[in-house]
Amino acid sequence: MKAYKVDVLYEDNHLLAVNKPCGMPVQGDKSGDFHVVQWAELFIVKKYNKPVKAFVGLVHRIDRPVSGVVLLAKTSKGLTRMNEQFKNKEVEKLYHVLATDKLTAESGTLTHYLGKDSNTNRALTYNKPKGKAKESILHFQILRNIGKHSLYEVRTETGRFHQIRAQFAKIGAPLAGDVKYGAPHPLKDRSVGLHAKNISFVHPVTKEKIKVTAPYPKSNYWVEFENSVG
């Protein structure tokens, strides 16, 4: 079983936010690999010396080759209320994207229609409505260029399957290392240039405004950009 380094970014009685490393699944899948929910269960049991299995609820997900903030609930109350915030689109998630090419505009909005090919596990991206494809909207802002890569901050209005990866690829700027969507070559650690940078929400119990930020991975091209943005 591969050992992953998972850092705790925020914790209280109801919530646990971690910085997921690329390559680690968020929850169990057909690979059977050790995943974030298992890690959290073991972390809580060990830290608080619990005699039984800890409650851990998964609030949201990010793709396996993606790094960054993952929010978990330690109580059923926390899970239910956070699920409601996500359903009502009251949670803001910001992503940082390493694209293999610079977009024609420094900021803007991308609107496409996304479907899914279950055989290849890829999103199908269309410029106009087609069949059951769903409207997918994201907003981007360039932060910096270094060499052949450009760093963007992205906010999604919709939460579609592989949305950021597919939409950037559709306009000719696939994410670094994302060979599934047209990047010229993989990165050494098989990650893609997508990092869940921060998540902002209202605490489900205290009603305090919370913002959790995840540092960049210490690998690949992220190191070049780590001092360029907050």
Image: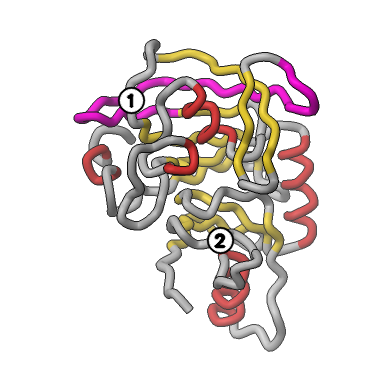
Is 18 situated above or below 46? Answer: above
Find out whether the residues at labels 2 and 1 contact each other: C-beta distance under 8 Å. no
Depth check: 77 or 224 in front? 224
Q: Is 186 drawn above or below residue 113 in the view shown?
A: below
- Residue holding disc 2: 25
- Left or right? Give the position of 49 relative to 182: right
* Nearest to the observer: residue 139 or residue 189: 189
| Mark nearer the N terminus (2 vs 1) | 2
Question: Is residue 143 highlighted in magenta?
Answer: yes
- Which region of the structure is painted magenta? 129-153
**Occupied quadrant, residue 34:** bottom right
Q: Residue under label 1, please give it.
A: 101
At label 2, the amino acid type is Pro
* Residue 180 screen position, x and y as percent: 49, 43
Tell me the SS state at disc 1.
loop
As drawn, the residue found furthest toward the front would be 119
Task: Classify residue 218 by image quadrant.
Answer: bottom left
| Residue drawn 74% across the image and 54% down it | 79
The residue at the point 46 percent across, 55 percent down is: 19
